[in-house]
Amino acid sequence: MCAIHQPNFFPRLSTLAKLFASDVWVVLDDVQFARRDYQHRCRLAALADVDHQQWLTLPVHLPYGRATTIRDVRVIDPGRNRRRVARLLQHYYGRSPHWPALQEPLRKVLEVLDSTDRLADISEVSTRALLDLLGWPGSLRRSSQFSVRHEKSERLADLTCAVGATTYLHGTGGAKYLNPWPFTAHGLRTELFTTPEGHPMWRAARRITAMRALTAMGPIAVADELQRHLSLNPPRR
C-alpha cells in the first residue's frame, strides 16, 4: 500500500498518520509548489493551550515563478532559518519531559538546513525523521524518479503501479477529485484514510504540526495510538 503526498515541513499529525499507515511513501516532489500549503511551513501550537498557535515558515525563492515545482524551490538563507527553527521549537516544546526524545529528528533537520537550500530535501527529512521516531518500517520513493502521465488520477495510478503497490491510500481531500478508472485499469485498489477522532491528541490534527502531540504525549504513546487506530480500522492491502 502506498501513500502519495507532497513533502511537508514538520507535517500535521493527520498527514503523518496517513503515511504511517502506508508501506511506501511516494514523495510528490515534481508538482507545482503552493504557498498556501504546508510544504514550507508548519503551524506550532503551545503545549499548555492548543489554540495558541504560530506559523513557522521557511522563506523561499521560486526560480520559475508560480510554475516552479517543489523540487526546484530554494530556501532563502537556510543558515539563518536553521537558527530560527531551533529557537522556535525550543520555545514551544523545550519544557516538555519528552523534548529529549525529539532531539534526534530535530538534529537531522538542522543538519540538512546546514547542507542544502533545497526545500524538498528539508521538508522530506523533517517528515521521515518523525516517521523513524515512531518506528515506521516503510520505504520512501520520489515521484520525480518515474515517468508518468500528467493527469491527476492517472499520475497517482501510475505511481502506485511503479512502486509495486496494489493499493493507493488517500485522504478525504483526494477523494474529491479521484477518478477510479485509471486504478481499475491497472488492477489497483483505492483506500480512504480518515483522521481518527476521540483521543485528545487528534484535536486540531489537521492544522498543527505533529511535533505538538509528540512532545505532549511522547513518541511511544503516539505510536501506540496510531497502531491502535490501524488495528481497529485495518486498511486493505
Image: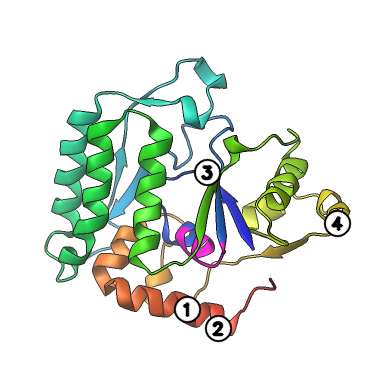
Q: Residue at x 81, y 49 (%)?
A: 179
Decide: marks 2, 1 in contact (CB < 8 A)? Answer: yes
Tell me the SS state at disc 1.
Answer: helix
Which residue matches tag 3? 6
Q: How many angstroms separate mark 3 from mark 1 (CA)? A: 23 Å
Which residue matches tag 2? 231
What span is in magenta? Answer: 16-23
* First of labels 3, 1 by sequence position: 3
Decide: marks 4, 2 in contact (CB < 8 A)? Answer: no
Which residue matches tag 1? 227
Decide: marks 3, 1 in contact (CB < 8 A)? Answer: no
Q: How many angstroms separate mark 3 from mark 4 (CA)? A: 24 Å
* First of labels 3, 4 by sequence position: 3
The answer to whether residue 94 is visible is yes
**Location of residue 59 (image quadrant):** top left
Q: How many angstroms separate mark 3 from mark 2 (CA)? A: 26 Å
Residue 144's place in the image compared with 131, above or below, is: above
In the rendered image, residue 16, in percent from the top left (x then y), is placed at: 45, 60
In the rendered image, residue 9, in percent from the top left (x then y), is placed at: 38, 45
Tell me the SS state at disc 3.
Answer: loop
In the image shown, does 9 or 201 lie closer to the viewer?
9
Which residue matches tag 4? 184
In the image shown, does 202 or 234 lie closer to the viewer?
234
Would you say residue 89 sits in the magenta stretch?
A: no
Q: How many angstroms separate mark 4 from mark 1 (CA)? A: 29 Å
Residue type at the position of mark 4: Thr
